[in-house]
Amino acid sequence: MRKNIEAMLSLSSVNENNIIYLIFDKLSKVSEREAKHSIRVSKLSEDIAIYMNLSRRNIKMTKIAALLHDVGKIKIDINILNKPGKLREEEWIEIKKHPEYGYEILNSYYQTKEISQYILFHHERFDGLGYPKGLKKYEIPLISRIITVADSYDAMISKRAYKDSMKKYAAINELIQNKGTQFDPEIVDIFIEKVL
């Protein structure tokens, strides 16, 4: 997996690559499923950023932030993370802390400090009903809004211990139905029209 990650991070310095890989490797050891999900979300997010004509630097930031968006899950009890079936209320509360845990981890390294904010806000919603801060619309950083769309799509089409995968068309329909509430409408349109 290291070669795949190094290829993805080719725009970064060697020192930055090492820190990012070490952090990502911890997630891989906790959950290979989460690591593979993060790689897919990184690619989808990068593609969205490219089609949005973001700068080369912001495309790189998007790619790395998406790769590390779930790294906070390394602080979640493995039994909760891999639980088959519905989570209890207290378990769901713990899962919802992973953006803050990810922020704490990434904010503690110079090389990942800047992207830590994108991880913190990747579960905010366009209508302000997300977490952890309840930001809405353009209060949410663009990179976080991009990751939200890519992350949600990949989660929908992936089989999890607690749910079956959705068909691609059903996931697309879900994105369309939640434009302007959960998701930034412009990003959803670009994702559907250009990336998929």
Image (spheres, rainbow, N blue to C red):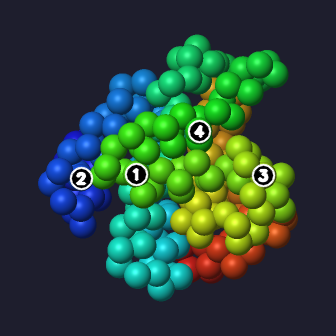
CA–CA distance in space, label 2 to label 1:
11 Å
**If you read the primary sequence from the N terminus, does the residue marked by circle 2 or circle 3 appear first?**
2
Task: Tell me which amino acid carries mark 2.
Answer: Glu
**Disc number at residue 11?**
none
**Would you say 91 lies left or right of 63 here?**
right
Residue 174, horizontal then vertical, whole percent:
78, 59
Can residue 35 be seen by looking at this rendering? no
- Secondary structure of the residue carrying tag 1 is helix
Residue 144, horizontal then vertical, whole percent:
58, 60
Mark 2 or 1, closer to the camera: 1
- Secondary structure of the residue carrying tag 4 is helix
- At horizontal 51% and vertical 24% (from top left) the residue drawn is 75
CA–CA distance in space, label 2 to label 3:
31 Å
Q: Quadrant of the N terminus?
A: top left
- Residue matched to label 4: 100
- Residue matched to label 1: 113
Residue 69, horizontal then vertical, whole percent:
50, 47
CA–CA distance in space, label 1 to label 3:
22 Å
Q: How many marks?
A: 4
- Residue matched to label 2: 16
Can residue 126 be seen by looking at this rendering? yes
**If you read the primary sequence from the N terminus, does the residue marked by circle 1 or circle 3 appear first?**
1
Task: Tell me which amino acid carries mark 3.
Answer: Gly
- At horizontal 59% and vertical 38% (from top left) the residue drawn is 100
**Would you say 44 lies left or right of 28 here?**
right
Task: Tell me which amino acid carries mark 4.
Answer: Glu
Give residue 81's quadrant in the image.
Answer: top right
Task: Tell me which amino acid carries mark 1.
Answer: Lys
- Secondary structure of the residue carrying tag 3 is loop
